[in-house]
Image (cartoon, rainbow, N blue to C red):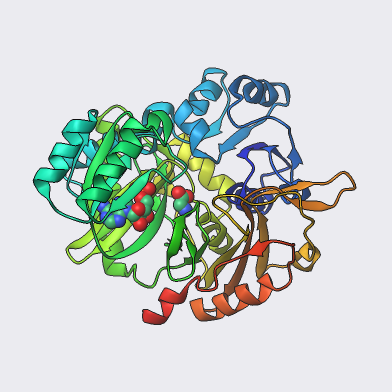
Amino acid sequence: MKILVIGGGGREHAIVTAIAKSKKATKIYCAPGNAGIAELATCVPIGVMEFDKLVAFASENAIDLTVVGPDDPLVGGVVDAFEAAGLRVFGPRKNAAIVEGSKAFSKELMKKYGIPTAGYETFSDAEEAAAYIRAQGKYPVVLKADGLALGKGVLICNSEEEAMAGVKEIMLDKHFGTAGDKMVVEEFMTGREVSALCFCDGKNVRPMTSAQDHKRAGDGDTGLNTGGMGTFSPSPFYTDEVHEYCVKNIYEPTMAAMAAEGRPFTGVMFVGLMLTPEGPKVLEYNARFGDPETQVVLPRMENDIVDVFEACIDGRLDEVELKFADNAAVCVVLASDGYPQHYEKGLPISGLDAFKGCNDKFVFHAGTKFGEDGAVLTNGGRVLGVTALGSDLKEARANAYKATELISFANKYMRHDIGKAIDEA
Ligand code: AMP
Ligand code: GLY
């Protein structure tokens, strides 16, 4: 099969790596890809939002299967565009990707179908939102811009003053653009966070192994929110009992709810969970593989991923049993110092060759490009994801941090406490 992957980050590098192991894949393309993906796939210089060009490329090159990585094209309807051209594509249609595109939609869905989540109200008027928050008088309170905001449209406010500033930032100053036309005001929850990535075929759901992200930029969960600074898998807090509860009360009811709403979900549904003292509750839904969760989940998967993609598209996921190795993985993100704000790009990276041909450690490129002389240069805030396997989480973590030492670039920055939570398990 000729397979096209849409995207160009660490998630897509991990997806391309999994596809490259498939017996079915004869040729892989990636649009736009990056310097790491270029080792396994032919990179095509088309942007993820250039739907017409992507569809034309897939048609002209007789692509048998297209896999969509990022949220923006999914929410924008890239799957619908491929289907309209008679092309096979893995991902949710626009009317299902709305679970990520609108927080107001997903909160309402959960309320209607009794899926556990934090209590909330939705507002499209700033003054009404402010009045509601004041009347409640309960802090911290969580404010969420309705639409896509690079995972950054969530404010946790510890006082009335902070909350009023937050309402202004989201709804009046439009800090997150039109994502802030509507806003969700949500009850604050406490507990461990778990990312559950689930394959879905519109009716059936097959959860992958669990993972945990680290969203803040600094050690000890300090500093600004980022796209994710590192992950580990599995989560020791996501026990069999928690899993059973989530399958019965969250994953299966969500699939059924989407189908009942005439929005059957096909693709990967990422359920962000909070394990609260009252039980697991949904923080958010995403309509795609998580990044950097994918960099620890897929290296542990034993299935042929192309078989799983096809089963999802054909509505026969019930025939598939997902298999994950009885090991663990840790991914440490190497970022550019200054991320997520201001940072330098275009700096040469050395040490990448040390990972060539390895099956127990991987370097997934998140933001890299080729320089004129063919050298690999930094090209983003998150530059690389260094993943290592181990027989357990402690070993995987030690291996991952050892592997980070193999790589150097001038403004290399990383957290030093990825996976520290496992010491408390
Ligand atoms: P989200 O994009 O909705 O997952 O929110 C981003 C992050 O904000 C989450 O990973 C949590 O750490 C935090 N967060 C979101 N909603 C809540 C909530 N209701 N209570 C506590 N923390 C939250
Ligand atoms: N790691 C969080 C996300 O992919 O949204």
The residue that appears at 66% across and 49% down in the rendered structure is 367
Question: For this rendering, which residue is in front, 146 or 354?
Answer: 146
Which quadrant of the figure contains the N terminus?
A: top right
- Residue 17's spot in the image, x, y percent? 66, 53
The residue that appears at 58% across and 50% down in the rendered structure is 11
Q: Residue 292, relative to residue 286: is it above or below?
A: below
The single residue placed furthest to the right in the displayed view is 373
Left or right position of 351 against 266: right
- Marker count (numbered): 0
Left or right position of 94 against 142: right
Question: For this rendering, which residue is in front, 27 or 287?
Answer: 287
Q: Residue 262, relative to residue 339: is it above or below?
A: above
Which quadrant of the figure contains the C terminus?
A: bottom left
The residue that appears at 52% across and 31% down in the rendered structure is 73
Q: Is residue 116 visible?
A: no
The image quadrant that residue 349 belongs to is bottom right
- Residue 305's spot in the image, x, y percent? 57, 50
Q: Can residue 5 be seen in this view?
A: yes
The single residue placed furthest to the front in the displayed view is 161
Left or right position of 253 against 421: left
- Residue 183's spot in the image, x, y percent? 28, 36
The residue that appears at 55% across and 76% down in the rendered structure is 397
- Residue 105's spot in the image, x, y percent? 28, 33
Left or right position of 291 against 138: right
